[in-house]
Structure formats: structure tokens, C-alpha cells
Image (cartoon, rainbow, N blue to C red):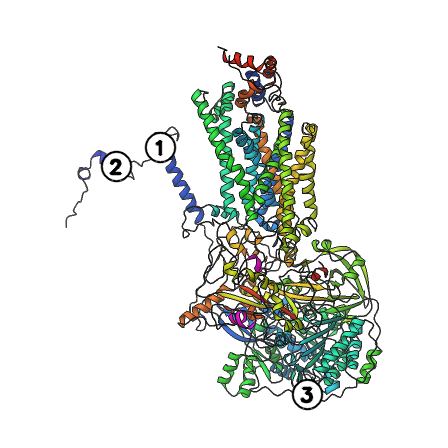
Amino acid sequence: MHLKYESTLREPLVDGVKDYHKVTEDIIGPIEAKPGKLWYVGFFISLSLLAFGVFSVTWEVYFGTGVWNLNKTVGWGWDITNFVWWVGIGHAGTLISAILLLFRQGWRTGVNRAAEAMTIFAVMCAGQFPIFHMGRVWMAFFVLPYPNTRGPLWVNFNSPLLWDVFAISTYFTVSLLFWYSGLLPDFATVRDRAKTKLRKLLYGVASFGWTGSTKHWQRHESLSLVLAGLSTPLVLSVHTIVSFDFATSVIPGWHTTIFPPYFVAGAIFSGFAMVNTLLIITRKILHLEDYITIGHLDAMNRVIVLTGSIVGCAYLTELFMAWYSGSQYEFAEFYKYRAAGPLGWSYWIMMTCNVITPQVFWFRKMRRNIMVSFIMSIIVNIGMWFERFVIICTSLYRDYLPSSWVYYRPAWPEVGFYMGTFGLFFTCYFLFAKYFPVIAVAEIKHVLKTSGESFKNDMTKYEQESPEKFAHDLEHAH
Amino acid sequence: MEQKKYWKGLEELHNTKAHQEIVKNEFGEDLPFDESDSLLGATTPRRDFLKYLGFTTAAATIAASCEIPVKKAIPYVNKPEEITPGVPNYYASTYAVDGEYVPLVVKTREGRPIKIDGNTLSSVTGGATTAKVQGAVLGLYDTARLRYPTINGTETTWAELDKQVTAALGALSGQPVVLLSSTILSPSTKKVIGEFLAKYPGSRHVTYDAVSYSGMLLANEAAYGKKTLPSYHFENAKVIVSLGADFLGTWLNPAEFSKGYGATRKIDQEKPEMSKHFHFESTMSLTGANADERFTHKPSETGAIALALFSALGGSVTAPAIADKRVADGIKKAAAALQASQGKALVVSGSNDVNVQLIVNAINNQIGANGTTIDWATTANYRQGVDSDMVQLVTDLNAGSVGALLVFGVNPVYDYFDGKKFADGLKKAKLTVTFNDRKDETSELCKYAAPDHHFLESWGDAEGKTGYFSFTQPTIAPLFKTRAFEDTLLSWSGNTATNWVSYLKNEWMSKLGGQEAWDKTLQDGVIEPTTAPALAGATFAGDIAYAASKITGAKKGGEIELVLYEKVAIGNGKLANNPWLQEMPDPITRATWDNYACISNSRAKKYDEELGDDYEIHAGKKVLKITANGKTVELPLLIVPGIHPDVIAIAVGYGRNMNAGKAAGEVGKNAYPFVSYNGQTFDYFSPAITIEDAGKKYDLGLTQTHNSYEGRPIIKETTLQEFIKNPKAVNEDREELSKYGKDFRADGTLYPNHPYPGIKWGMSIDLNTCFGCGACTIACQAENNVSVVGKEQVIKAHEMHWIRIDRYFSGDENNPEVVFQPMLCQHCDNAPCENVCPVAATNHSSEGINQMAYNRCIGTRYCANNCPYKVRRFNWRDWNGADSFENNLYDVSDMNDNLTRMVLNPDVVVRSRGVMEKCSFCVQRLQDAKLAAKKAGRPVKDGEAKTACQQACAADAIVFGNVNDKESRVFKIRNEEQTERLFYVLEETHTLPSVNYLAKIRNKDAAPKAEGQHEEAAHH
């Protein structure tokens, strides 16, 4: 007897009575069926947002960055705020797939596919901002270090913006590979079940000739581990490098060594919240409650309360350091113009949403309440948006020389650009939800027999046995 | 001879069938393309695909990049001898508009005047200029100028115009001709006018100054029998008391006075001394902002203040009591200081009231100013208009007793207090001719327009002071079909034998005695007495008692009073259509493009506005409805710390109509109707006004909204007393740091020190002699093609100035101290901007200059964010048409008209939108100086390379040079002369700026403020 055993004390990762076929039916089924009305409505709204975003960006590129309300003092506003926000969101996917894989956290299987997709879409959205915030976007290729006839003239390797270019593009590439390699067996499943020629052809191409041979599986497992190994440092490095944009500068409020860990924690915080937002909707619409269980939400919410508290500590540390450093510019920045001053309201939104409200997750009841989880996931992302806004704008608007102090409020094309990235994100997500298996079928099957509810129930009899007998039986099973 | 047959091979010789096939084909062999039907199905599809791809990409690239717009450049067929492309020519000229006297040197490139600077040969101004003068070059290329003579607004020829006007003049049948002009400094022009008017008996020349000084002229006549202005020698004064005279900004000839006053404000650290300046005024003027002791009063109290001062000095008058104790004490203090500096003191007044000016004359007589600080031997011609003459003319016009009205350089329909009455009268004249340069409010009512040249196209002379002449010669051929005013008059007086050029030349040839002397005169631009005549006084014979009784008997003011003032940039409004000057931030309010009601914070509270965050972050300000003299104007309020709590101040010179030009048209409101006539002179204040909330808001474009420097060590200041006691105190914080190493440059970093072995450029700015006038801003704008953005963009904080003057208030809200700090790129040797640019578009030169490679810039704005001085300027929109996109030009003031673009400096590229720009230390000038030195085979000498801001500064507050040169001024200032006052802004961030500042010293008794006390004041 070969026995896969997991204590019944552990919550099942898959609810209900399932076998492999049922899992396939549940997850691949929606791909083969016509999408529901809700899908169409959502997709249309997303497309409209995307179109408005394209219009806003076109307007900005044509007439110049001056159509935004950025100015001589606040050179970055909503653009870079949104960039950092989206990049932060993009952290959850890789964290879930890579780090949790390395830590052998079985619960990741239910959420990793969607989380990784979210990562990729979020990084795509994030990438728009540094590109289109440039005054001369058609010269954007100057940031690439390639041999050229201008000297040759190289990029400035001292610039954190350049590090961003490398960090973000590497992260995107690795995340994409990771996501796609995980998709291969599932695409093959779709291909094998396909009843139309087109579907067979397309999923056939997409699955790269996956046959499910042992060798394929072996290579697949190794590749996953290698990519997980590669991604793990990236999860930490990307936001570290994004934080360098600020930390290496001289502006009070930016010039802070605490930024790297603080940014990474914040990124995971917001990323997990975004995963929650999406999963709660997805499980409802695609009827995947059995696969994305309350247990999953509970686990996610624990991470949220942990990272939220880390972020809270960082805020307090910043305040302490502003006083302890003895720098009058920094002191004034934090106490007079961030916590108070014309943009002080944004600081308190940040504090409320990021530090105070997530404390509800200390209570198990709250962690396992879908409505609370959903609302909190939104609140956290509002808070994290304001965190970036606070860091970027409230530092710039009151820097060294009071003569240059200004106020900043966005113009419509800035808001439009942000809405447009929501359009891009959700357009991609809706297409993903329709055409891709939103849950990793192969991986679910992998854990099904240890952690599926029905299989776990079979274990009850073993639970009642004495450990000696259990061990003996196991040893002499053949 | 037989035709030989050559063959390449046997196939050709025998002409085989296969060969015929080959010949038929264009190519000998098959091209290595697989021409099968489907690309993917071809035998070698991949390779061919790559070939096709490569070819089409290359072809598309070439095709796409070949479309280069055709720009026409026409070379000289015969190159003029004196013009070498790329090499500037300089001509001496004169700014003599409305009586201001500033001898100039005009830089022309390829025949186009592009930059104006002061003529250092003039002992009157010593090369000083003002913002207005710097901006005058743009006026030449003003698109609103009249381009041809007109009759009733339609174009005509000069011949036709001459014929009709001569006929009309002939038909006047004895009715007088009146020539109405502003102050004319040219003796030759006056002679021409005289000859012309002599032909028409009973005719007269009326001089009318939009902002009048006739009170002074009449008082001088009453006191000294001379209806003229004396020369003021501020440089000789140890104590200066100004009763509302804004002599650094707008009063008479500010360029001259800034120079003189500046000389008294320079500090020698070995034996520190400086003049003491008391200022009494109603609003906050540029000069008041620079005063050591400043007091405010209502405008109706001006006379009382003068009397009180006179009485305190022992004058035989009884002064009315001054209710405000601070002011009363101030008067006592000022009197004591004047008394103590007999013969080294000066009192000036900005009042246009004869009696007030007479008392001021009496005071000056009392303190021995005549012959020491006031010179009656060399009198000044700066203003000549007498108000009653103008009032008489308007009466005559309305009575129909004027036959012909010739308007030259004035615009009374706009700037006369009763413009409508003047307009009505004008319509009654039989013949109306205007010589104005545009179809302004007065010209559009005149039948004939005979536009005069711009002064940069003209010949002329100017006698600023008796015996002090400056000349004007054309720097460019007339751009339009205009004609010199003098030529027009000459031809109308029937003097067809001579034209104006030869007339002028003849005048001077006879005086100078030959062509050579004349040539030399034009080259130098000025003629001055070889030895300056000794200063002389005059005997005071004024009726003090009468003046005092008039002052005491004057109507008392109401609860709130109105005062009118001129803005430093716009002045009386004549040259208002100048986008540079419209966009120049006002030195005090930092507002652009508008006039407004200056109001105190305490009064603004009544209208729910007060200094604070809300006020700062909203461009929209409450609009007030201000009524005085039965006239009403609606203007937004603007809170000005330091204005008297019960005074509203409004600038004149705004509210022109669209004919004045795109920049001036419909900007602000006309405040001239608030002027009143007191029977003798015009009053530029109104003692009784009413204010109402108009219930709406209006956006003002301010370039600086936060008024306090929050006690930060970016400004260092002390008092003279303290400085004498302990010169080290200024840099106490620096002493503190020196514990960690003397050499901040080397000890403040882990990185190796970067050496600058050759030239290392550096600048020193003296906060004690920077008066905040803004001449540097405009000079920089002209030199470096800095874009104009318009009010909407100023509101968005998108202005482009490379050098700005930060103005901070400190102390009490009603009596603040003011400090000006010119802020430009500090050319940091450890520049935060440089290491954050991803594409290395901004980098450091071996001479210590922080450079911008515009072509490389992609516009991430990271450099601007990381600049602690916030001096980097981003091209938010396409200001210059230098962009790849069509129809997205953002130009609100015709700055991109082909005409206006002629002002661009060809040595400086215009920037396309999306790139960052900033001060370059005028690198084009530095290159020029280095090249000249190289040709001469020697190093660059100090003073050969000057930045535009340095050159424009009347008080020499800016010193620039090579800090590696031990003989340079900047080296000496930093290492020998001014070591105690020297500081670098934000030195503690280790940016290693190349610009240093010298601490400001106030000559006041008050103990220096304790740290943190600054924060209290003028808080926002």
C-alpha cells in the first residue's frame, strides 16, 4: 500500500468529493463553454476603460507632459505612484509561486495560477507609466545599453531608473516563463479534450507538444524549481530597486535607508490584497469555491496582517528617524508637511487603510469572512496607493527651498491613464479567465489525494489507529 | 576600319541558344530568392524570410528617415563687409523711453539685434540696466507694431500721407497745432519739433508723462527757481530716507540709482560699513523691501510724514501728530540719523504733490544734501511733463480750439485719468496724427498714423543730464514701412532738403568738429564732460509755511485708502506688450501677467482669505469691487505682507485693449481712472474708497506661493552691529561642522576627489546688493532663448526661468523683513541630478559646469526631482515649435511668429518639448571668451567671460569667473575679501555648489533674531 497521508486536523485544500476527472471538468469546463453574461459586461467595461486610457495617453504624448498637472517642483505624481503601486501588486504572484513553492506550502496550488497571471498583468500595467511619463517617449530606447554610433554613448549605470529598467524587465520575463511553464500540462489537457479543430490547433501550439511523458514531468518539475530559485531573489530585488529610485536621492522623505525592506513588505501586502480581490470574484463567478476555499483566504489574510504590521512599523520608524536624525528638513517634512500640511489628508488615509484597519485580521472570524476579506482587500490597496502617493508627492511638494513649494492635484489625462491601466489589467484578466485554466489543474491533482476533503475523510480510520500499528502496517504493506 | 568584335566567351562568340536566353534576362543568374507561391512552403523559407525581412526593414527605415524638412537658408551674394556669420557686432545705442536714460550696447548677429546691455562708458549708469531695458529688444520684433502709414486705418503710402497732412495743416486757418509727447531727451528732436511748430503760430508742444513727476518739477521751481530735476548721488549718502520713492524699481531712472545705492551697500569685512536706509511708504515696494528700517502709513499721510520729519530736524513747521507710535519713533530715528550725517544724507520722495516735494526740498536743504548728494550743477532731464499743461490741453481740445493734434509716444486715452474726456476732445480736432508704434487706444482715434521707427532702428541723441549725451544709431534696417518721427516732421515743415540722419549729423559735426569725432562718438555711444563738473547746491527759497499749511489743510483720508504704483517690469504700461516682462514675476508679489489689489492679511480676512495653506494652494483669489472717484474696477486680491493694513495698492499699466498686442491685451484692469487732479498735479492715490466682495474668484499666476524660509539656513543674515561685533557668527554652523574636517569637499565623501586642473567656473552672489529687481531674469531670458509659457502655465508652475529671485518675508506680518535670493543652477560638483539621469543626458564638464545634452534627454524629470534647489526647468509643452508633432505648439503671446523669432540668440539652441533645461552659466559666452583668448595665445583673463545675469546686474551683486585664477574677483571674494559672509546654500547635502552667496547684512539696531523666531512670521 502506498499511502499519502496528511493529518485531518489540517484543513482540506480542495473541498467536496472530487476525483481527477471531476477536477478537470470543474476547471477546464468553463473554457469550453460560452462565457456568461457577467463576463461580457465585465469585459466590455474593461475594454472601455482601456480605450479611455489609450485616448488619455495619446493626448499626453501628442501635446506633451504639460497636460498633466506635474510641475517644476513635483516632477512625479500619479504616474510614478501608479507605477510603484502596480509593481507592488505584481509581487504577490511570484511570491506565491516561487517562495511558497520552495517552502512547500501546499495551499498555494489553489491560487498560484491566478496570482501569477495577476503579476504579469500588473507588471504590464506598471511598465506603461515609466514609459509614458517620459517627455520624449519616442526616445525611450535610449535607456537600453546597446552598441551605437553615438560615440558609443552608454547609459548611466549609476542611475536607479536604469536599474529599474533591468529589474522590471527581468522580473517580467522570469514571471512570464514561470507562469507559462506551469500552464503547459494544463494547455495539453485542454488540447486533449478539444472538440473543435481550432481549439485543438491553438492549444496544441500553446502546449508545445506536451505529451505527459515521465521525462516531460521530470523536466517540468526541475524547470519549476530552477525558475522558483531564480524568482525568489527577484521578489526581493525588484521592489528593493524600485525603492532605490527614492532611497538614493537627496530629497527629505526619499533619502531613507529603510526603504528596501519597507517597500518589499508593502508590495507583498498590496499584492496579496489584490489576489484576494480577484480570487473572491473569480471563485464566485466561475463557481470554484471548492478549489479556492475559505482556508485559502484565511492564509492570505494572515500574510496581509503580517505585512501590514511590518509596514506600520516602517511608518513609525520613519517618524522616529526623522526626529532622531536631527535633520531639520526631514523633521519638517515628516511632522509638518506629511502628517499635517496641505497634503496631510493623504497621510492619514494611508495610516488608516494600511495600519489600523488590517488589524481586524487578528480575529479568525474576520479572516474567514468573505465580505470582510473582500472589503479589506480593497481598503488595503487604496491605502497602498496612498502610501506611494505620500512618499512621492508629499516629499516633493515641500522640499528644501520653500520658494518652490507647490500643491499638486492630477489633471484628467493622469486619471485617465490610471483608469486605462485598470482597463488593460481587467481586459487581460477577463481573457485569461475565459481562455486559460484559472487554477493549476495539474498541481491541484498533485495535492488532491493528500489534501482533498474526500480523501482526507478516508484517513479518519488511520487517525484512530495507534501510531505503532500505523507504522507497522505501512512498513509491511506489500 | 573594320569593326572588331570582342567576345567574352565562346558562348558569346557562337551565340548559342543558352547564351541568348541569358542575354534576354536582366540578371545573369537566378537571384537567390525562392519565388515559390507560399513563403512557408518554399524550399528555403526561413533564410528567404530573413532576407525579405532585412531588406524591407532597411528599406522602410531609409524611406522613413529620408523625409527631412527643407529649410531655406540663403547665403549672401555679396557679403557685407562688416557682417561675418557667427560673429556678433556691437552698436552703441540709448534707451530713452519716457525720460529714462540708459546708454546701451546692442549685440547684433547677422544683422539682427538680439541682446541689450548697458554701456559701461557712461558715468551716469555705469553699464547698469533694468529688466525693462533688457526686455526692450523684444519690442523691436513686436507683432502688434504698425507696419505702414495709415489713413483712417487703411494702408497708404508716405507720399500720399504727406500730401494729405500737409494739405490739412495748410487748411487749419490759424488754429494752433499741438504736439503731444512724453518726455523727450533728444535736443535735436526738440529742435526739429521747434522748427516745425514755428511754422504754425500759436502752436505748442505739450509734454505729458503718464506717471507724472510734475510735483517735483514745480517744487524745484518754487524752491530753487529751476523747473527741472537735480542729479541724485546715492553713492555719496550715508543715510537715505525715502518717502515712498521706489528709486530701485520705478522712480525716475532706477538703473542709475541702483548703481549708486548698490555702492553704499557693499561690505568690506575689514572695516564694515554701509548706508542706512529708512523707508516710509504705503505699499510694499521693491525699494522698501530693501530698506533697513521701513514704516508704513496711509497715502493721505505722506505730507504729514514729511512735515514731521522736517519738524524733527528743526524745521520751522508744526507737524500734525502721527498717531502710529512706531512710525512716529521711526521719524525721530530717521531725523536723528540724518542730523548726524549732515552732508552725507539724502531724502527723496515719490509724491507728486508740490507741497510735499517742497518740504522734502526744505529737508534736503536742512541736512546739507544740496551740493553733496544732490547736484544742481548738472540737472537731469528725466521728466519734463507738467500736469496743468495737459489738463489745459484737454480743456482746449474739448473747446474745439485745437486745430491739429499730433500724438507722439503717448497714449492719453488709456493713461490719462479722464481718458474719455481726452478722447472726446481729440475727436473735435480738425487734424489728428499719431506717430505711435501701434494702433493703441489713442492712435485708433487718430485719422493719420505715421508710425515712428523702433529706437533700435533709429538715429538719435539723448541728453539725460546737462552735458551728458548718449547716441542712438540703427542696429537694423527698418523692419517695416515706418519713418523716423523727425523725418516726418522735417518733411511736413517743408524742409525737404535734408533728412533726419544728415540733420543730426550736421548738428553734431558742427559741435564736435569733424567726421572722425562723430565716428568716435557713435562708437563710444556717449559724450560726457571730460572732467565731471563739481557738485553744486542751490539756494532754497521756497515758501515752507504755505506748503505746510496746504498739507495740514489737506482732506483727511477715509478708513481705507487706495494707492497706485508702477510695477518694475511693466512700468506705465507703454511697453506692456512684452511677453518677457509680462511673465517676469513681480519682485514682491511674485505674480505674473496681471494686476491685482494688493491687500494686507488682516484686511483680507474680512473677505475670507488669509495667508495659509488654503490661500497658497488655490490660484483663485477673491475678486474685490473697488470704487474710488466714482469709478469701479474689479480685481482679485493678493495678500502682500508689509502693506499698510488700511491700504489697497493697484498697479497701473494693465488693462490695455487687444490692439496693444496679444501679450498686453485684456490682461488685468486699467487703474489710471483712479488718478485724480488736485488742481495742480495728479494724485496717484485716493483717500476715500469703498470695497465690496464681488462674489467670484479669479486665478492669479504666482511663481512663488510660500513666503517664509522657515528659518532654514538657506539664507544667512545678520545686522551690521552684530557683524562688527562678531563676524564669525554668520557661519557658526559651518564652524560646528569643521570639527569633522576643514575640507568639506574631500572629507565629506568616501569617493575620491575630482580635480579641476584648468578652468573652474564659479559664481558669487552678494545678498546685500541683490535688490531683487529681476533684470538678471530678463537678461537670461534674452540671452538663452528661455521660453514664455503664459499665465495658464504659470498657474501650473510650468514657468521656464533659468534664474529666479526667491523672495522671503520674515518677522512681523505688517512690518516684515524681506530678503531676495537669486536662485539658479548651482553647478554642483557632486550634482544630485547627474547621477540619477538614466541616459547620462546631464553631466559635468571638466570646467565644473553641469551640462545638459538636450538631444540625449528623454524627459524622465528625475533630475528635477532630485535637485535640492529646484532650478531645473522642464519643457512641458511645445513652447517653440521645435517638436516633431504638428499643431501642438503652445504659444499664447506670438513668441513663435517669424518676426518675433528674430530675437532668438543663434548661439543657443531652442529646446523641444519633453526635455529638461536649466542655467548653463552662459556656456556660449564662456566658449567665446576662451576662443578669443586662445586666438590671442593666452589664458582667459578675469572679466572676459561674463554671464548675462552678471552683466545685467546694476549693483554688481553677481560676480563670475575662474576660481582657479588667483587674480580673479571670485577667487578673491571667496578666499580673501568676504570669507566671513561666504556660505553655500544646502552645503550640508554635500552637493558642492559652484555658486556661493554672501550673507545679507541689515543696518538696523534690532538684535538678531533667535533661531526659530523666523518661523513665526509671515508664516506662509
Q: Are the residues tagged 3 and 2 within 8 Å (C-beta)?
A: no
Residue A164 at x, y = what percent? 52, 44
Say which amino acid is labelled 2: Ile
The residue at which mark 1 appears reads as B35
Q: Is residue A320 visible?
A: yes
- Where residue B319 sits, quadrant-wise, is bottom right
The residue at which mark 3 appears reads as B537
Q: Chain of mark 1?
A: B
Q: Which residues are magenta?
A: B971-989
In the image, which is nearer the foreground, mark 1 or mark 2?
1
CA–CA distance between discs 3 and 2?
Answer: 111 Å
Q: Is residue B248 visible?
A: no
CA–CA distance between discs 1 and 2?
Answer: 19 Å
Q: Secondary structure at mark 3?
A: loop
Packing grade of label 3 (10 A; few <14, some 14-19, many >=20) is: some
Q: Chain of mark 2?
A: B
Residue A291 at x, y = what percent? 60, 23
In the image, which is nearer the foreground, mark 1 or mark 3?
3
User: Residue pushed farthest front?
Assistant: A468
**In this view, B867 is above or below B386:** above
Closer to the camera in the image, B903 or B571:
B571
Residue B213 at x, y = what percent? 71, 77
Closer to the camera in the image, B36 or A140:
A140
Q: Secondary structure at mark 2?
A: helix
- Where residue A265 sits, quadrant-wise, is top right
The answer to whether residue B593 is magenta is no
Marks 1 and 3, the one that precedes in the sequence: 1
The residue at which mark 2 appears reads as B22
Packing grade of label 1 (10 A; few <14, some 14-19, many >=20) is: few
**In this view, B888 is above or below B926:** above
